[in-house]
Amino acid sequence: MTRVEEAIKKDVVDQLYWDTRVDASDVQVEVNGGTVVLTGSVPTHAALRAALYDAWSVVGAVDVESRLDVRLPPSVLPPSDEELAGTIASVLHLDPDIGSVDIRVSANDGVVTLAGSVTTYWAKMHAEETAGRCSGVRDVKNLLNVVPTEDAIDKNIADDIVRALERNVLVDADSVTVEVNNGEVTLSGALPSWTARQCALEAAMFTRGVLKINDEMGLRV
């Protein structure tokens, strides 16, 4: 491992131990040419997501590979799949930000599947994140369809995303290429940081009419 890779590794480890959302005691970090590899286990799916964000946020990290497992502490009794699915279904049904009752939840050995439909792409991702915060979830398969309440033209969707990028101080809109085909958005280009990349993704995620996002953006090295 080079000195640069050692520095990236140290920063990722420090970030994980700093983050109170993550119990990093069983997480191992390796770096290979700017790619951060996380192995080991964390107690919740939410902690797994947080660990990925922490690794991405470190200067010099150009890619993150997760080999993490979710393992509940021995003192915590895992819920049955039926209990887990019921809990998540209730939480989603009561969430005013999702605004849809057409969500079906099933679970198999802690792997939760979301099916049905929501009205926006953001609601789809919000449902996945909400489900992942429930104790006992090992992974989430998001099969939700986005069914907008009104028709949107691809050109209007693209224009809305570009304008959102132009308003964002953290993103150089000229560095992001936006293509829209039947509501499916593809973002490409090279950005200077993970934060800028997240801002570009959110510009598409929160735009009305977006059905799917293909992230083909990279980080400048």
Image (cartoon, rainbow, N blue to C red):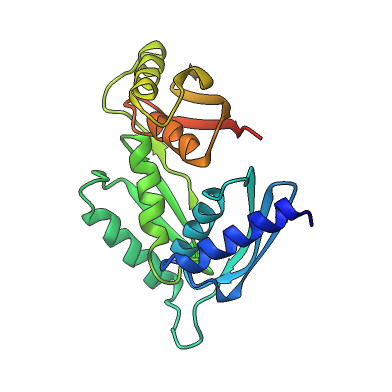
Does 44 sit above or below residue 66?
below
**Residue 154 spot, x, y in % from top left:** 41, 14
* Outermost residue toward the right in this view: 1
Total label count? 0
| Residue located at (66% from left, 35% from top) | 221
Does 62 sit above or below residue 12?
above
Locate the N terminus by quadrant: bottom right
Q: Quadrant of residue 116?
A: top left
Q: Is residue 100 left or right of residue 30?
A: left
Q: Is residue 144 left or right of residue 193?
A: left
Camera-side residue of 165 and 1: 1
Camera-side residue of 124 and 12: 12
Q: Is residue 197 left or right of residue 10?
A: left
**Residue 136 spot, x, y in % from top left:** 45, 71
For residue 93, say whether it is visible: yes
Q: Quadrant of residue 164?
A: top left
| Residue located at (31% from left, 35% from top) | 119
| Residue located at (37% from left, 72% from top) | 83
Does 123 sit above or below residue 185?
below
* Outermost residue toward the bottom in this view: 75
**Residue 66 spot, x, y in % from top left:** 62, 56
**Residue 152 spot, x, y in % from top left:** 33, 18
Camera-side residue of 56 and 94: 56
Does 60 sit above or below residue 210?
below
